[in-house]
């Protein structure tokens, strides 16, 4: 898997958070990690260990104080439509319909014509199963459906990399399972975006169900405590013999 | 000579600040009583809020007769001081009272449940929940109140009505007196002293209070929607960095205060205090009513007098006056809003960390008493009718701009981080960012800001359309409601003055109900903001 080439790489990245009191918190220091092509990477760790910061650095939202982010062989200095981020609580704009909420991801694109943008939006709404809800408003949707709108919005620019920030933690278990299956399905389908996925979570079962490789973070500044490939057949099931073996070993690494 | 002048300035300045401090303390104290009562009890709310709403629309000049006849002339020695403090109070009280009311209404149900369960007495509820919950909002409102008080500083120190002119020594009367005598040197020096003292007060009083108040903040993470009934804006609400002060701190405090044995003792003593307070309140009210009744001219004569004044002025001149003034208000508000939008966008998008430096500066400029500065530059606007209009609009703007700027800024800073990340991820910038992200989030706050600013602008026309006695310093050539009000006040024509005050109050209240409230409701509906 790791031989398939590197999609994105963090090289010796340091990020300092300056508190108002003058204290500097070193969230991450000299941190390196790479995301491979066609990989589903899971990042787990206790709360406050800097997982979300790492994800935002990968997205180009935070520029690290030191070190580099290399995306497709080039330094990444700002956000790009080729990297998408899905938040834990999807920030949908309440005054826009489902369709318009997805559309804003393409609003600034100069390469697509208006018609192409509209077609693309309805294609991706269809893909996440929201056909018929185009003109609904976010407050009319359930939590799971809102997360689907966010997914369509993240994918509509056809990114190579999808970053997930605890995407299922606010959903009920059934909705979370079906949504995670859908993301897995799209990732596996080589004709659909994204090529690679990075998921931050503290749900260990979730990460064992989805990830090719799990990185366990801890400490402050954050360090990679351990790395573990998950070699289970897809589609995975919790009933698989080795499943809880993985879960237990990751659990013991965290605690 | 120099020494005498400096001493005079310092003494006047201290006297003005002393009055201001007393008025502000009174405002906060009464705002706590009224705001908490209205926030806690539905029946009181129904009675008090509409009354406050109308009273805050009454132009400050409308309070002059009360100030002069019931306080200045009927109470010996301290009456004049009381009148001045009362007038400052009318500039500072309303927004603080509405702030407290909103804060009490915003106390989360979970906290109220804890109060219910723990069987707390009233004293404990006040000291542990309602007052702490109000503190951040009071702190937010202080700059606006201060700016307002300074705008009407001179008006509150020179109680002029008809031939009577009762001037108190204070920095406002000192400056206007100096200008009237053509003593620019004294005026400029006094103004500099005012600026210095305001800066010092911001630095050493207001800002420490704000950061102290942040400890009590627990309502910031709420959505941008506000109960539409509320009139006053939340000026300067979210400029702080501590956006995510934990909500939990509050319920923890609430749970820690349960030594029930203590509560019983407190409850009993509080009950006694309450009865005493109630008795003295009733006694005070009776005395007040008796006093007012003795002083008040016959009701019938008053009504007839006002009607006669209305008839002698005529309908057309009044309509003309209102029309011209309304045009000025509209131009002033639209101009100020456009400029605010540009400044706020620049501050939020481009200024970065500079924002923390620019904001306090703006605050100080905001509380510069424009009516005292303006006479110095008034000659520049005397040239022709058009430049006089421009001067009037500038003078109005100096009293309204900050409301609009603060509420726009407040709205813009309400946008949560994830939405800003969204704009960055999808490269929404410039107009797109304004249209999709900033404006919709800011609209409720902007509308409340414009509403208050419009009321404020109507209040400022009394000064802006005609500054100085006998048309002395500056006046517009076209008709105006403020102009005729100033003329009636100068003539001491109380009935005519009452008539214009009533008309202006009606216009402000009507604009609030017909235009701004509807706009607010429409915005909330169109934006689909649900709590």
Image (spheres, coloured by chain):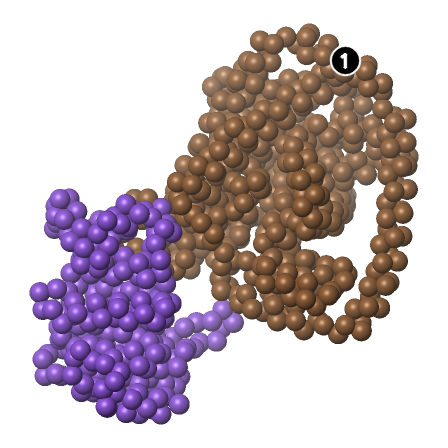
**Relative to B426, is A20 on the left or the right?**
right
The local crowd at label 1, few if under 14, some if 14 to 19, many if 20 or more residues have their Cα within 10 Å, is some
Residue closest to the far front: A239
Q: Percent position (x, y) of residue A95?
A: 36, 46
- Look at the numbered disc 1 and give the secondary structure of its residue: helix
Q: Which chain is purple?
A: A
Q: Percent position (x, y) of residue B260?
A: 77, 72
Residue visible at 72% across and 41% down in the picture: B89
Which sits in the foreground, B221 or A248? A248
Q: The brown chain is which one?
A: B
Residue visible at 32% across and 44% down in the picture: B435
The residue beneath circle 1 is B305
The picture quadrant where one finds residue B425 is: bottom left
Image mark 1: chain: B
Which sits in the foreground, B221 or A132? A132
The picture quadrant where one finds residue B342 is: top left
Q: Percent position (x, y) of residue B308?
A: 73, 9
The picture quadrant where one finds residue B15 is: top right
Q: Percent position (x, y) of residue B488?
A: 70, 17
Q: Can residue B40 be seen in this view?
A: yes
**Relative to B452, is A70 on the left or the right?**
left
Q: Is residue B483 above or below residue B286?
A: above
């Amino acid at each position: 898997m790791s031989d398939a080439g590197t999609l994105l790489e963090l090289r010796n990245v340091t990020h300092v958070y300056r508190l108002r009191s003058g204290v500097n918190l070193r969230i991450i220091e000299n941190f390196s990690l790479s995301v491979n092509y066609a990989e589903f990477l899971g990042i787990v760790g206790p709360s406050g260990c800097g997982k979300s910061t790492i994800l935002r650095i990968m997205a180009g939202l935070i520029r690290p104080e030191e070190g580099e982010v290399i995306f497709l062989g080039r330094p990444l200095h700002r956000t790009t439509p080729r990297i998408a981020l899905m938040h834990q609580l999807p920030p949908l704009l309440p005054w826009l319909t489902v369709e318009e909420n997805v559309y804003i991801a393409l609003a600034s694109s100069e390469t697509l014509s208006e018609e192409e943008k509209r077609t693309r939006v309805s294609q991706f709404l269809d893909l996440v199963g929201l056909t018929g809800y185009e003109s609904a408003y976010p407050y009319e949707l359930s939590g799971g459906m809102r997360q689907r709108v966010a997914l369509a919005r993240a994918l509509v620019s056809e990114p190579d990399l999808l970053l997930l920030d605890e995407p299922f933690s606010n959903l009920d278990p059934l909705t979370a399972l079906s949504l995670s299956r859908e993301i897995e399905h799209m990732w596996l389908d080589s004709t659909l975006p994204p090529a690679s996925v990075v998921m931050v979570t503290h749900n260990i079962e979730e990460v064992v169900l989805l990830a090719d490789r799990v990185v366990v973070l801890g400490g402050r500044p954050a360090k990679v405590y351990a790395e573990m490939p998950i070699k289970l057949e897809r589609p995975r099931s919790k009933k698989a013999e080795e499943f809880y073996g993985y879960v237990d070993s990751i659990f013991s690494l965290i605690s | 000579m120099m020494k005498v002048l400096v001493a005079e300035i310092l003494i006047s300045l201290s006297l003005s600040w002393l009055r201001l401090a007393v008025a502000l303390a009174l405002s906060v104290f009464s705002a706590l009583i009224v705001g908490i009562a209205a926030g806690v009890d539905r029946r009181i709310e129904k009675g008090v809020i509409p009354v406050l709403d109308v009273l805050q629309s009454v132009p400050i000049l409308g309070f002059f007769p009360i100030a002069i006849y019931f306080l200045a002339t009927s109470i010996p020695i301290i009456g004049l001081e009381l009148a001045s403090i009362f007038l400052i109070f009318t500039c500072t009280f309303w927004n603080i009272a509405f702030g407290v009311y909103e804060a009490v209404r915003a106390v989360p149900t979970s906290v109220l449940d804890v109060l219910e369960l723990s069987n707390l007495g009233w004293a404990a509820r006040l000291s542990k929940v309602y007052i702490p919950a109000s503190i951040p909002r009071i702190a937010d409102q202080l700059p606006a109140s201060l700016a307002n008080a300074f705008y009407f500083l001179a008006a509150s120190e020179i109680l002029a009505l008809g031939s009577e002119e009762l001037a108190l020594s204070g920095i406002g009367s000192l400056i206007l007196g100096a200008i009237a005598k053509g003593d620019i040197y004294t005026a400029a020096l006094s103004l500099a002293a005012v600026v210095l003292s305001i800066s010092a007060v911001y630095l050493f009083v207001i800002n420490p209070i704000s950061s102290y108040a942040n400890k009590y903040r627990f309502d910031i993470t709420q959505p941008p929607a506000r109960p539409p009934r509320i009139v006053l804006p939340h000026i300067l609400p979210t400029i702080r960095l501590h956006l995510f002060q934990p909500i939990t701190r509050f319920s923890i405090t609430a749970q820690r205060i349960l030594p029930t044995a203590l509560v019983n003792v407190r409850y009993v003593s509080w009950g006694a205090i309450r009865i005493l307070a109630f008795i003295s309140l009733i006694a005070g009210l009776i005395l007040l009513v008796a006093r007012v009744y003795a002083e008040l001219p016959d009701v019938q004569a008053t009504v007839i007098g006002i009607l006669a004044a209305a008839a002698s002025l005529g309908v057309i001149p009044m309509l003309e006056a209102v029309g011209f003034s309304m045009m000025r208000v509209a131009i002033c508000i639209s101009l100020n809003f456009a400029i605010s939008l540009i400044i706020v966008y620049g501050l939020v998008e481009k200024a970065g960390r500079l924002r923390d430096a620019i904001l306090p500066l703006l605050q100080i400029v905001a509380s510069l008493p424009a009516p005292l500065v303006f006479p110095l530059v008034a000659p520049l606007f005397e040239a022709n009718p058009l430049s006089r209009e421009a001067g009037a609009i500038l003078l109005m703007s100096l009293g309204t701009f900050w409301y609009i700027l603060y509420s726009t800024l407040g709205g813009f800073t309400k946008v949560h981080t994830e939405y800003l990340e969204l704009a960055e991820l999808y490269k929404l910038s410039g107009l797109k960012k304004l249209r999709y992200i900033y404006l919709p989030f800011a609209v409720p706050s902007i509308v409340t800001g414009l509403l208050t600013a419009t009321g404020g602008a109507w209040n400022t026309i009394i000064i802006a359309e005609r500054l100085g006695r006998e048309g002395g310093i500056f006046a517009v050539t076209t008709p105006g409601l403020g102009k005729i009000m100033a003329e009636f006040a100068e003539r001491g024509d109380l009935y005519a003055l009452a008539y214009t005050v009533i008309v202006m109050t009606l216009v402000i209240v009507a604009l609030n109900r017909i235009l701004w409230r509807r706009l607010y409701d429409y915005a909330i509906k169109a934006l689909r903001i649900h709590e």
